Each structure stands twice: as C-alpha cells, then as structure tokens.
C-alpha cells in the first residue's frame, strides 16, 4: 500500500528540532509579557469574507494564496493566512476595544498560518508566526516601543548583527491616493520598461510594483515619484517623531521609501526587519500601523499597530548563525536504571527526586533488560547522571551513582543521602 505523506510545504516538527522552537517560543513570549502584552487565541478557520475585507481583494494573499473551501453547509471558509484580521474580529466580537473603558489593548498571539505559495527554504504553506497588536494608541510612541521590543529580542537571541530595520511611512489614504495616481501616470508612460508582473499590477495594485525584485523595474522606479514627497503633514510629523524616538533609544534604521507591504490595511508607519542571510526569504518580522482596519471591519475607529514574525525564518537564522545555547539540546538530567525486579523502588526514588527538585528531568528505565543494555541507554539519554538500582542495592537501601559526562568514580551511597548529593 502506498504510504500517505504530509502535504507539500507543511512540515512535521521532529523531537531533535523541538528544543529550538521551545527556546524561541519561551524567549519571545517571556519578552512580550515583560512589555505588558497579554496573550489572545482565536480560531484557525474563519469566514472567507473576513480576509477579503481586511487584507484586500487584489492582494497576492487573497488573489492566489488562500486555502479557501466550502464547508458542508456551503459556507466559504478560509484557513487564516495571517493573524491581524482574526485578532481584530475577536476583539470586536468580545468587546475588548470599547467596553468598560478598556480602550487600550496590547496583545500577542502565535500559531500556524496558511498560504498556498511555492514551497522553498523559509517559505512554507503552513508556517508559524508570533504576532503583536496594540489597539487604541495613536503613536508614534507605541510604534517606537514595538521596534525597541523587537530590537531587544534580536539582542537576546544573539542575531542583532544580522538584521536591519527598514522603515517607511505610507501616509494618509489621501496622500497615498494622490501618490498612486502620479505613480501610475508615470509608469504608464514607460510601461515597456516594467516586468510582466508589474505591468499586470499597474491596473490592480500599483503600489506593490515598488517592491518588485526585477532589476529593470527597480531602475525605472529610480526615476519615478517617491512616496515620501507626498506625505501629509500629520503623517510626516508622526514619522519624524518616530525616528527621533528610535534615535534616542539607539535603534538603527534605514529609510526605504519603496517599502509598501503586501496588505491593504496599512497606513503611516510600516517596517520590516530584514536579514541578508536567508536568500530572498529575508524578512523575519514585518508590520505597521493600520488605523483604518477596525472601522473597516465594522468597529469604532480605533488606532492600531502591530507586527508578525516568521518563526521558521528565525529558526533558520539562529541555526545559520550558530547562536543557539548548547544546553537547550540536553533534555534529561538523571537516568534511573532498574536492573532486576526493582521497579517499585525505582519509581519511588524517581518520585522523591521529583518532589525535591521540581525542575530536574528524570527518566526511569522501563522495559527491563541486562545491566549492559540499560547502561547503553543511560549513556545515550544525554543525562548527566545514571542512578543504578539492582536487587542488592534495594536490599541495602542503597543506590549507585555514576557520572556520565565527567571523569569521576562511581559511588554507592545510602538512598537517604542521595538527595543531598544531587542538590
Ligand atoms: P514575503 O514578502 O516574504 O512573502 P509577506 O510580506 O508576505 O512576506 P507578512 O504577511 O508580512 O509576509 O508576514 C509576516 C512574516 O511572516 C514575514 O515577514 C515572514 O517572516 C513570515 N512569512 C510570511 N509568509 C511566509 C511563508 N509562506 N513561509 C514562512 N514564513 C512566512
Ligand atoms: Mg508573501
């Protein structure tokens, strides 16, 4: 019979890699809590309409990347391609934004996202994100804080030297509309110098042409109008204040006037943390301000800003840069060997150790076998210490302690003395 395989672009996370994910998850979620963010969880499946209305009908995501299907009731559902839309939906539905004076919310979430893309290194069909959203704050202080928080994360992970912050302002929707009109007029005159994809976008989503990777399109854009020249006064002041806050905090950035992001809901601040170490999948964290979205989804106008971080890309970067702490790969401290008919004594000893040292990782040998065979397993387990219980030891209420990773003679001691020795 042909074996069933996982879907393309949807990976299993195997035990040898899970310590990396756990290390990253605990570092990141601890950091979010340290900045006063609270966790929110929402479903993976939503009505298709939610994403169409928020991300935008003519974006890559909605046009060609969503996993959309009809359920048994003929309702159109979509596996979430990102978290912001669901987060806004959940906040609105549960009245987190305008009830009981809880005007401000600082939230984080994590989990799988789904996009039908061409799978490659750092680009999957089921990928995972950490997301952060702050509601009810006009900024630019909160915009700056999000960037200060992410800069601290890179520092704590040891990858600061490999990531660069790119910053832009998209201005108000009026400013953007005016720029868009002038950009389209300019590009129409030079249509033949655009790549095919960009020619298509000229009619649907012209701003996306700005981040085309094609050299000839980029060359043409050097001559095109620049978004920063169109900023309205308010957006310009916001942008200047944000830059000053980042300067004061020592967070370096590069202004990239062509940074537009692939989702329609952004305005004013947009940013990406980019690395050159992962090929063309170089953006590890991306976000911006989306003051219009809550209203667009039926809520009261609410300022909002947030970002999404790709976990797979961060894992790749940590591995590539060799900055993972070695100790995360050790998953066991003590291996208890039970040679002969001594299971009750072995379990009792293991429980005593767990009572006294709740953080200690203790495995009791199960499945019998000879001394030699159990010793091999203890060696391979990665534990620091093997505790050997045979029938003689149990009769004498003793235990033999053998160090597995340092050159120190094994000792046989009273079980009552063991706990102090392990301390
Ligand atoms: P890209 O330009 O690389 O396609 P994007 O602009 O579509 O990224 P966002 O929607 O902003 O990405 O998602 C935020 C982050 O999630 C990205 O910066 C990236 O780290 C990660 N990400 C997005 N799509 C994928 C994917 N298919 N596989 C792995 N990670 C992804
Ligand atoms: Mg994309």
Image: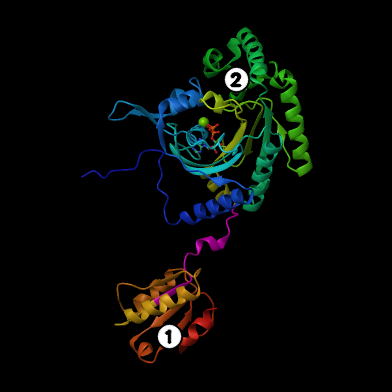
Q: Residues within 10 Å of mark 2 (few under 14, many from 20)?
A: many
> For the point 41% across and 75% down, which residue is it?
351
Q: Is residue 350 magenta?
A: no
- x, y percent for residue 179: 66, 15
Q: Dots 1 and 2: beta carbons under 8 Å? A: no
Q: Residues within 10 Å of mark 1 (few under 14, many from 20)?
A: many
- x, y percent for residue 133: 58, 38
245 vs 94, left or right, is: right
Image quarter hosting the N terminus: top left
Disc 1/disc 2 C-alpha distance (Å): 72 Å
Name the element at disc 1. strand
Q: Which residue is mark 1?
A: 399
Tell me which label, 1 or 2, sits earlier in the chain: 2
Looking at the image, residue 297 lies above or below residue 282: above
Q: Which residue is mark 2?
A: 207
Q: Which residues are magenta?
A: 322-336
Q: Residue furthest bottom?
A: 396
The disc label shown at residue 51, or none = none
């Amino acid at each position: 019979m042909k074996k069933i395989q996982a879907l393309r672009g949807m990976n299993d996370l195997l035990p040898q890699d899970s310590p990396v994910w756990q290390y990253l998850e605990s570092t990141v979620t601890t950091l979010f809590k340290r900045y006063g963010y609270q966790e929110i969880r929402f479903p993976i499946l939503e009505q298709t309409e939610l994403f169409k209305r928020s991300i935008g009908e003519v974006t890559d995501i909605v046009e060609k990347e969503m996993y959309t299907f009809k359920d048994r009731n003929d309702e159109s559902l979509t596996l979430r391609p990102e978290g912001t839309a669901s987060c806004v939906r959940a906040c609105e539905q549960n009245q987190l934004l305008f009830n009981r004076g809880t005007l401000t919310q600082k939230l984080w979430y994590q989990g799988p996202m789904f996009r039908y893309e061409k799978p490659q290194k750092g680009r999957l069909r089921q990928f995972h994100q950490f997301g952060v959203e702050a509601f009810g704050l006009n900024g630019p202080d909160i915009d700056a804080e999000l960037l200060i928080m992410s800069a601290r994360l890179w520092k704590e992970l040891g990858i600061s030297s490999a990531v660069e912050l790119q910053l832009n302002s998209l201005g108000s929707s009026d400013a953007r509309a005016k720029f868009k009109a002038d950009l389209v007029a300019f590009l129409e005159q030079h249509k033949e110098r655009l790549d095919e994809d960009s020619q298509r976008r000229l009619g649907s989503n012209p701003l996306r042409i700005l981040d085309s990777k094609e050299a000839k399109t980029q060359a043409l854009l050097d001559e095109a109008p620049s978004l920063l020249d169109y900023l309205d006064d308010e957006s310009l002041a916001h942008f200047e204040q944000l830059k000053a806050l980042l300067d004061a905090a020592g967070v370096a950035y590069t202004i990239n006037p062509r940074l537009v992001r692939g989702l329609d809901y952004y305005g004013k601040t947009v940013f990406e943390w980019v690395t050159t170490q992962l090929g063309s999948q170089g953006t590890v964290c991306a976000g911006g301000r989306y003051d219009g979205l809550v209203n667009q989804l039926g809520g009261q106008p609410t300022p909002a800003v947030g970002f999404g971080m790709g976990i797979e890309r961060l894992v790749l970067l940590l591995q590539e840069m060799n900055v993972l702490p070695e100790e995360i790969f050790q998953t066991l401290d003590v291996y208890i060997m039970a040679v002969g008919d001594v299971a009750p004594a072995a379990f009792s000893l293991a429980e005593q150790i767990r009572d006294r040292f709740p953080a200690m990782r203790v495995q009791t040998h199960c499945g019998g076998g000879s001394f030699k065979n159990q010793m091999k397993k203890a060696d391979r387990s990665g534990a620091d210490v093997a505790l050997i219980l045979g029938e003689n030891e149990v009769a004498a209420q003793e235990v033999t302690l053998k160090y597995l990773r340092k050159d120190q003679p094994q000792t046989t001691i009273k079980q009552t003395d063991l706990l102090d020795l392990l301390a």
